[in-house]
Image (tube, helix red, strand yellow):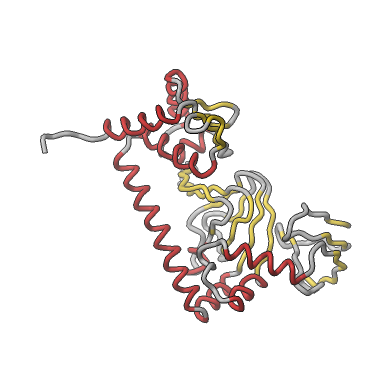
Amino acid sequence: MEIVLEKYWWDVTVKTNVRLKKRNLVPTYLGSNKLKGCHMHTSLSLSSEERLNKRMSFLRQVALFAELEVNDLKIIAKNLYSRKYKKKEIIFHQGDDSHALYLIVKGKVRIFRTSPAGDETSFRIFSAGNIIGEFAAIDGKPRSTTAKALEDCILLELESSTFLESIQQTPKLALGLIKHLVKKLRWTTDHAETIARYDAAGRLLHIILHYNKMFGKEIDKGRRYELDLSLNQSDLASLVGTRREWVNRIFQDWRKKGFIKYEHGKIVILDLPAAEEERIRRMDTNVVDEGW
């Protein structure tokens, strides 16, 4: 069969009569025509050296790897596996005994936990340039969360053994990892503060405004924006710890007030200044004044 992949620097046309059994593996062949003992005849749109340079250039944009020496960066780049995930496809499950980490090249990924009762609690949305799955890669324990593609995604996978070996041999990578984990801890602290300071509507509004800065499409500068998080109202409810019905009611209320609406799976900020004022007001309503 012939597998023709989307033209991009990590893609390749592969001709083979053997089915690729490893899930979502997109072969990238840095100088080799063998995969798991199977002989491949490949037709590369880029030379191996060009592809390696492209990967290294991408890694330079990821804070964890940005300060590595060229030879150290090359080792990482040579050991990356390119994987493609369709929208709504699971990348890894909570409880999985898998330990690879992933770099997101394209698309958005939702991270969440599922309770014994089956209820989901979403924590964060990651996008291009972010790293996911590093906790299991570091401590070797089962996955603490589930990662799900919110849209078609391309990820680069790095096996934990390669990552840990590189950390032991590369002080700059070890320091980069410390900084990376501290950054995530700071985000967790900020998120905890949001939970404490805002009521549920304020938390939802805060999250919308936060992701609008990252992903929002400007329609009218400083006022109107469109935000496509590929999340339904149940997903949004799981981000703020409430029920879908409540999220639906608050969106109806905000639409009447003329500053946010939810339409066809997308969030439209109709009046950004008004939304920001509402966020401040929601914070104030969560403060209890007992005369102190």
- Farthest residue toward the top? 256
> Residue at 34% across / 43% down in the picture?
194
Quarter of the picture holding the C terminus: top left
Q: Is residue 113 shown above or below 286?
A: below
Q: Is residue 104 shown above or below 239?
A: below
Q: Position of residue 257 (x, y in %)?
A: 42, 20
Report the side of 249 relative to 106 (left or right).
left
> Residue at 38% across / 37% down in the picture?
203
So how many labels did they put on this image? 0
Depth check: give the residue in front, 267 or 135: 267
Q: Position of residue 145 (x, y in %)?
A: 50, 54
Quarter of the picture holding the N terminus: bottom right
- Farthest residue toward the bottom? 169
Q: Position of residue 73 (x, y in %)?
A: 60, 73
> Residue at 35% across / 30% down in the picture?
277
Report the side of 152 relative to 255 (left or right).
right
Which picture quadrant has residue 69? Answer: bottom right
Depth check: give the residue in front, 120 or 73: 73
- Farthest residue toward the front? 221
Which picture quadrant has residue 68? Answer: bottom right
> Residue at 43% across / 23% down in the picture?
254
Q: Position of residue 127 (x, y in %)?
A: 56, 50
Report the side of 130 relative to 243 (left or right).
right
Depth check: give the residue in front, 14 or 128: 128
